[in-house]
Structures are given as C-alpha cells and as structure tokens.
Image (cartoon, helix red, strand yellow):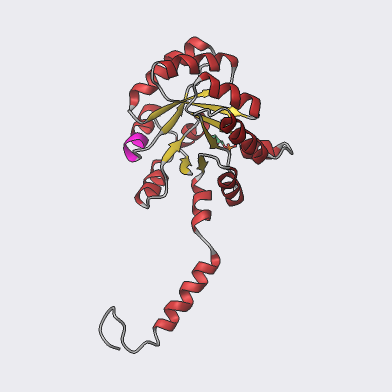
Amino acid sequence: MQVFMDSANVKAIEDAVEHGLIDGVTTNPSLIAKEGANFREVVEQICRTVSGPVSVEVVGKTYEEMITEGREIAKIADNVVVKVPMLKEGLRAVRELSRDGIRVNVTLVFSAAQALLAAKAGATYVSPFVGRLDDYAHVGMDVIRDIVKIYKNYALPAQVLAASVRHPVHFVEAALAGAHVVTVPPSVLHQLVKHPLTDVGLERFLADWQKVPQGIFGPPR
Ligand code: G3P
C-alpha cells in the first residue's frame, strides 16, 4: 500500500520525505487555502519536494473549466495528478484528460457506484472519503471494501485511494481492505509512528545499558 500525505504544508511534507515515510501527496482547495500562500508556488514547491504523485484539484464546475484548469495544472510538473470532483461533468473531463495522458484522481467519492463510473471514465486514482461517511453514520470503510472488490471483479486498473482518514484504525483497515493508497494528514502519520510501549521499552533498555561496564560505543566507564 502506498502512503500519501494529505496536506499542502511544505514543511510537513519535507519532514515526511526526509524520513522516507511517504510516496506522494494529496491536496485540496481547503488545504491549499490553509497555507495562505500563492497557489502555484505552493504546488511547485510540493512537486519539487516529493518525487511521487501530487494531486492538485480543479475548482471549475463545468466541463470546459475543468479541462482548461486540468491542462494548466498538469503543466506545473511531471508528477502532478489532476483532481476532479465526482460530477457528471467531471467524468466527462476525466475521460478527456486521461485520453491526453494526464493522470486524474476523482475526488469526493462516497459510493461504490460512483467509484465504478470514475474507473470506467479512466481515472488513475479514485478517492472515497472514509471519515466524512463515518460523520454521517455510514461505515466509510465498507465503501472501500466494496470498491476494491468491484475493481478486482472487472480487472479495472484504477487505484483505490482511501481519503478523509482521521485516525490509525482507518489506516490499518484500509490496508486490510486492500486499498492501493491511503492518504493521511501529518497528525495521523505521527500517530502511526508512535507507540507508548516503544518509548517505555527504549527508556528501560537505555537505563539498563548504563549498568554495562564497557559498551561498544564510547570509552570504558
Ligand atoms: O483530501 C481529501 C480528504 O482527505 C479530506 O479529508 O478530513 O477534510 O474529510 P477531511
């Protein structure tokens, strides 16, 4: 399973890349707005920081707007993936952009039916929003499981990208369900790395190490 960071924060992305934790990045208009910086500059910086795919969303709602914006966004860098919302017009744009060789991530997917249509339109990634479904008392992860099964049934090449991931259990369940990619905010990525028993265990090992008369590291005590 590939791990992407769901953020437009260059510092957080740099840190994750330095530690080899992520394979790509997903952004959305809200995440870009949160950075309070020039859209193009932020995207260019992110694309230089991570070598893997970087999803950048169009904001137009008509087919023409999505096509124009999508083509412009695709020119920013070779690793850009154009994010298109799951609308009827959006699917038309997905078909056109992917025909041009542009990779597309269909976003705001909330059902297996939507995901099947997005894959048929030629999407490279399809992003079901797990947490937002949970917010409305649906089990978001069930949608991921269904989509993975449907894509397998028909050997569809689209990749299931589990989005709106809110906690480590979502991450593990997405992996168990067979999602190809999971995108996590920086806070969840840090939670995934940490375990209190690791910290306690390490403290104990290092305290005991003090009792060793001569270590392999450093001079004799
Ligand atoms: O980038 C799309 C998605 O991951 C947003 O997540 O937490 O705003 O529902 P969230």
Quarter of the image holding residue 78? Answer: top left
Give the residue at x 42% y 25%.
103
Pick whichever, 216 or 144, lies toward us: 144
Left or right? Give the position of 110 relative to 64: right
Q: Position of residue 212 (x, y in %)?
A: 37, 87
Q: Quadrant of ligand 1?
A: top right
Q: Is residue 69 visible?
A: no
Q: Report the front residue among 199 and 123.
A: 123
Our reading of the magenta stretch's main secondary structure is: helix
Q: Identify the residue at horizontal 63%, vertical 38% (top origin).
A: 145
Q: Position of residue 62 (x, y in %)?
A: 53, 12
Query: Does 77 appear above or below 50?
Result: above
In the image, farthest residue toward the right: 137
Residue 169: where, in percent of width, then height?
A: 61, 51
Q: Is residue 12 left or right of residue 149?
A: left
The magenta region covers: 45-49
| Residue 176 image offset from top left, x and y in percent | 58, 47
Q: Is residue 193 magenta?
A: no
Q: Quadrant of residue 209?
A: bottom left
Q: How many marks?
A: 0
Determine the residue located farthest toward the top in the rendered image. Answer: 64
Residue 70 showing in the rendered view: yes
Determine whether 172 is above or below 156 in the image.
Answer: below
Quarter of the image that includes the C terminus: bottom left
- Residue 16 position (above or below residue 32): below
